[in-house]
Image: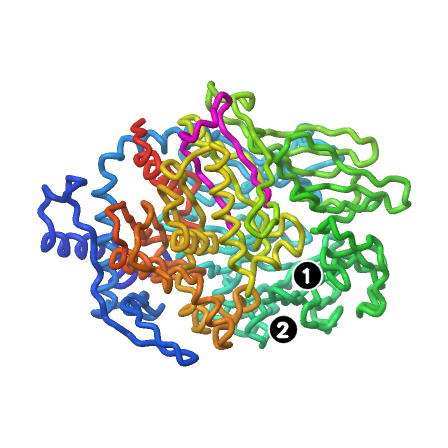
Amino acid sequence: MLRALTSARLSGAFVVMLTATFFIACQSPSDMSKDDNAIAPMAKQIPLELTDHGDTRVDNYFWMRLSDEQKNAETADAQTQDVIEYLNEENEYIEGKLAHTQPLQEKLFDEIVGRIKKDDSSVPVRDRGFWYYTRYSEGKEYAINCRKASGDETRYDDCTGEEEVLLDQNELAEGHDYFAVGGMGVSDNNRILAFGVDTVSRRQYNVHFKDLQTGEMLPDMIPVTTGGATWAADNKTVFYTRKDEQTLRSNQVYRHVLGTPVEDDVLVFEEKDDTFACGVYRTKSDAFLVIYTSQTLSQEFHVLRADDPMGEWRVVQPRERDLEYGISHYGDDFYIVTNLDAKNFRLMKTPVNATSKENWEEVIPHRPDVLLEGIDIFKDHLVVEERKDGLNQIRIKRWDGSMDEYLEFNDPAYTAGTRSNPDFNTEILRFGYSSMTTPSSTYDHNMRTGERTLLKQQEVIDENFSPDNYTSERLMVEVRDGVKVPVSMVYKKGTERNGENPFLLYAYGSYGASMDPYFSSVRLSLLDRGFVYAIAHIRGGQEMGRQWYEDGKLLKKQNTFNDFEDVGRAMVDMKYTSPEHLYAMGGSAGGLLMGAVMNQAPELFNGVVAAVPFVDVINTMLDETIPLTTFEFDEWGNPKDSVYYAYMKSYSPYDQVKAQDYPNTLVTTGYWDSQVQYWEPAKWVAKLREMKTDDNTLLFLTNMDAGHGGQSGRFRRYKETALEYAFMMDLEGITE
């Protein structure tokens, strides 16, 4: 790791020392080995009165919050040690409580990993005279990024070039508990690779440069970025985005020239509005560099010719409240996907030298029943990604108007979308397809002839697996206000609706993020043991169009929670399951969902799994020093406004914990999480232990070396998945 694992950074020795010291004082080794004798941790209480808008809240666990300075200090202070002791106590407790499931966890892990092809590789993509791909070697946790020089061939199978290893991430990851590569980009002359590295799991990447001709790393190193660097056309100038080191908001775009000191890099754009975040990219045409700055309800784009990196940037359309747009370049025009007078978005175009909105000309009109999600531009074709009735659609149009058609898909619930298509001068569209019974598939579609070629389908290493063994369904469930919510479901054939099936209901429901139905070989471990798995496409997502999102945010957020509860009750009423066998799962903002429904309908679920849950809503949204807070105001509201304060408090999981029975619950977090700070779930669990009136299991796991995305590596992450599955199976009496 870049940062020494000493004291507060928690070297293994330090963790072990704290854990051992703490538990010797609390329990005997014999007690710890017995599930029934494990003593549930009870965090100390230090009452803190917090008053806002004349309302006083007493927070007994505010002390669990540590600053980054405390976490990174050379010597841990008393508060840090108290926090670490508590987290270790919880980790020891869950280990003890689930000790009897260890054989099952190991079996599940072996199953999950065993289905994954170890020496797998991605479908190569051709770009600037090379085929680029990623491969994995058996026994290795990380990817190896490669390329081969291409000729005139249109298929990788015809390529005779020798493999060139760009990055062996396994070598770079040696000695690090956590490792992740950010954006990768190659210069126009194909010689220099820029890539980001994060070894802390805070999504703060150091950008490095590698000379692909010599294999040497260049001395240039750019710290605290979003992950990648965007090349200008001169092969020596890059643009990158820096993060505020406290809030982690990406707020500055810099220009760097290879071979010059990073300290001399030029600031070319700074986003001073703390509700916006910015970034930089290059258009598919390669003609323009683009700086974008965005928030939930507004975007702004600045452009610069890629062959003039020292030139002046110009704005496309100045930001306006509630005006969203995105740009693509083709010929003499920018093509603009926008919500201008179009809730579900429409497509416009404008000359590159006259870009303000009064010059925009409509290409595809707004449709109230179709959400226009994005476009991809080719020499002869325009590809449009849409969403209708909650499902993806891929539409292909010829620029000359001679063709306008949709690709056909047969599954009742599926996900489909374009993949990497960097080549502008091609008639081949690369797209991906998956359903709840069909493994992830990559196709090439000839847009001229209509010929479709399956390039690769995810291989499931299991002699007993067949898609024909499973059934998927798409239901529309009417909820309490008359709205119909889509539900995608999969289960093993022969499953009866008898009210006895273990049933896992998943949802997210925030940020307009659509949770599309997809295949998971990991999920087979549940299905083969009798579980029904379902995704509730609740409001707050964008599955049913933009209004679907708007009806599940801000002062309408309660719809998200009601939808999930009502879908769960419908599954019970339809005899798919019963409250004794119903489980709920969600992560991040989906973890907030879990906390909210646990408070309002605890009797509906036998168990809940909440991963990195956003549960301390008011405290987090009141503190603008916490990473990403200001960027979230348009999603949740600003609690400095009394109206939003009162509404947030009405559903905030931490604030609404009360003396009542709660379902069996498993909560997970990462100590270095930059998106949902570890102290949110830690406080929530402590308060649940204090208030709950039942004897149900409450478990809390903190990964001391991970952040929001959990453990790094190809396989290690499934240890936690196996634990989550074992938790639910144990409640069902499933032992193998």
Q: Amino acid at mark 1?
A: Ala
Residue mark closest to the camera, 2 vs 1 = 2
Residue 113, can we see it?
Answer: no
User: Can you say whether 359 is above or below 401 in the image?
Assistant: below
- Is 596 magenta? The answer is no
Q: Amino acid at mark 2?
A: Phe
Q: Residue at x 50, y 48 (%)?
A: 564
Q: Which residue is mark 2?
A: 269
Which quadrant of the structure image shows residue 414?
top right
- Is 505 magenta? The answer is yes
Instruction: Pick whichever, 100 or 70, lies toward us.
Output: 100
**In the rendered view of the protein, which quadrant contains the C terminus?**
top left
Q: Residue at x 23, y 42 (%)?
A: 97
Q: Which residues are magenta?
A: 485-508
**In the rendered view of the protein, which quadrant contains the N terminus?**
bottom left
Q: Which residue is mark 1?
A: 232
Q: How is the image coloured?
A: rainbow
